Image (spheres, grey):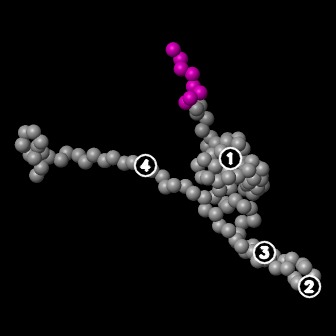
Amino acid sequence: MPQGFSTGKSVVTVQLSGHQVIEILPITPLVIEHRLHRLVCPCCSTSTCAPLPADVELSRYGPRLSALVGLLGSAFPLSFSKTQALLDQLLEVKISRGAIAAIRQRLSAALELPMAEALQAARQQSVAYVDEHRCPHRQRRRR
Ligand SMILES: [Zn+2]
């Protein structure tokens, strides 16, 4: 049993004390390059290029990055320039505002039908389950 520092009496462990440091891994973009053979016919100079594999995104931006762009433009309504700056500073992803707009349009189009179906299903429910409490930061204090 350990001895007390000044008294020389034995001490008893009552409780373990923990200290956690929360950290995140460095975030770096994952770039996957697909190289396509392009051939030119020596007779007629016709150029042909291999197609991308069927499972490769046609967009230059993958589904997770696209989903993040959608999230930043909806749940955290960031402007195009703030989305662009955040992606650059946080993820080191350089993306144009036009590309952000294209991603948002693609996501909106992809979500249009499922959103309409979810809305229709919600309207057919007998109970809405809507939280009508006011946001705490908007409540006024009465004195
Ligand atoms: Zn030819």
Residue at 93% across, 82% down:
44
- The Cα atoms of the two marked residues, 1 and 4, are separated by 27 Å
Instruction: Classify mark 4: helix, strand or loop.
Output: loop
Disc ID at residue 22: 4
Instruction: Classify mark 1: helix, strand or loop.
Output: helix
- The Cα atoms of the two marked residues, 2 and 3, are separated by 22 Å
Residue type highlighted by circle 4: Ile
Disc ID at residue 84: 1
Residue situated furthest front in the rendering: 42
Whether residue 33 is situated above or below residue 92 in the rendered picture: below
Residue at 68% across, 56% down:
66
Q: Is mark 3 within 8 Å of ligand 1?
A: no
Instruction: Classify mark 2: helix, strand or loop.
Output: loop
Residue type highlighted by circle 3: Pro
On whether residue 49 falls in the magenta region, the answer is no
- The Cα atoms of the two marked residues, 1 and 3, are separated by 30 Å
Whether residue 135 is situated above or below residue 49 in the rendered picture: above
Magenta stretch in the rendered image = 136-143
